[in-house]
Image (cartoon, helix red, strand yellow):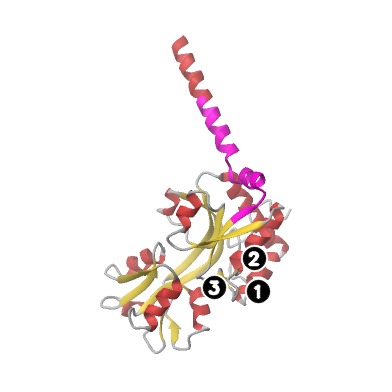
Amino acid sequence: MRGLLKSAGLALAVLTVGFTGAHAEGTLDKIKERGKVIFGVRYDFPPVGSVDESGNPVGFGVDLGKMIAKKLGVPVEFVQTTSSSRIPLLQNGSIDAEIGVTTPTVKREEVVDFTIPYIWDSVALIIKKGASKKLEDYAPPKTIAATQGSANIDVVKGLMPNAQFIYMQEYPDAVVSLLNGKSDAVATNRMNAAEILKKYDQLDISDDFYRDPLAIMVRQNDSLWRNYLNKTIQEFWSDGSYQTLYKKWFGTDPNFMMWSQYRLQPGIGQ
């Protein structure tokens, strides 16, 4: 019996140390100790994230990061992420969260966690003007360009199991492949496609594949930080600053609610 009690006490001590250590290493604590917050943002996906003529990051995600940093009371630093680099940068501690265009998927949630969706968009194809807008017309032998690590690849393959892909690091490279005839379409989100079409009169957008939720990505099992972000973006929605920022970058009011299709999470704005 004494042996069992001793073992149980040791196990409890280990659990207590593990819990305390995990809490001490939480992202909120790290931000306070460091004195700044570091957000990953996209440089290749307007209007959520791109760079201006001086090379500075701009976009909806960038401005939202600045709003969150102001609420935290610390300066903000931005680090460029891509479809393939965003998860490694988060896991190795280079960024505290990614405010980008990441779709929560079952596979991704094996290694990272997500806030509630903060943007709802749709997946479509950028195509050449005059080409068919019907998705079924882009099955093989057509070639679709996509960025490495994009969830859009799985979406397209789910509807077109034999789809042929070429992979790029960033979306501008994928668009160039379309313009140069090396691909027949680019798989992306409609909001990104709309921005790209402003630069290229010879391009168009296909029909939508499906409705796509995008969320802020955080490290796994960091619930205090995730909960803080969930509460914060809903508070921005409650006071109207979120909608103002959204309209600034997207040119329209949001066509979704922040927490559910009906209302904010109970307890927000009360």
Question: What distance separates the C-alpha of mark 1 from that of mark 3?
Answer: 12 Å
Front residue of 257 and 122: 122
Q: Is residue 45 visible?
A: yes
Mark 1 crowd level (few <14, some 14–19, many ≥20, 10 Å Cα) = some
Callouts 2 and 1 close, C-beta under 8 Å: yes
Question: How far is the residue under mark 2 from the one under mark 1?
Answer: 10 Å
Q: Which residue is mark 3?
A: 46
Q: Tell me the distance, in whole angstroms, between the alpha carbons under discs 3 and 2.
A: 13 Å
Question: Left or right of 191: which side holds 54?
Answer: right
Return the x and y of residue 144 as percentages of the image width and height.
Answer: 34, 74
Residue topped by disc 2: 63
Numbered disc in front, either 2 or 1: 2
Q: Position of residue 260 (x, y in %)?
A: 58, 59
Relative to 175, 25 lies left or right = right
Is 69 included in the stretch rendered in magenta? Answer: no
Q: Which SS class for mark 3? A: loop
Magenta portion: prevailing SS class: helix
Residue situated in front as seen by the camera: 181 or 193: 181
User: What residue is disc 1 on?
Assistant: 248
The residues colored magenta run 14-38
The residue under the point 59% across, 76% down is 53
Earlier residue among tags 2 and 1 = 2
Residue 264: x and y, percent? 64, 58
Between 209 and 145, which is closer to the camera in this rendering? 145
**Secondary structure under badge 1?**
helix
Q: Residue flagged by tag 2: what amino acid is it? A: Asp
Of the two numbered discs 3 and 2 on the same chain, state the one appearing first in sequence.
Answer: 3
Mark number displayed over residue 176: none
Residue 234: percent from left, percent from top: 65, 58
- Residue occupying image coordinates x 47% and y 58%: 86
Q: Tag count in the figure?
A: 3
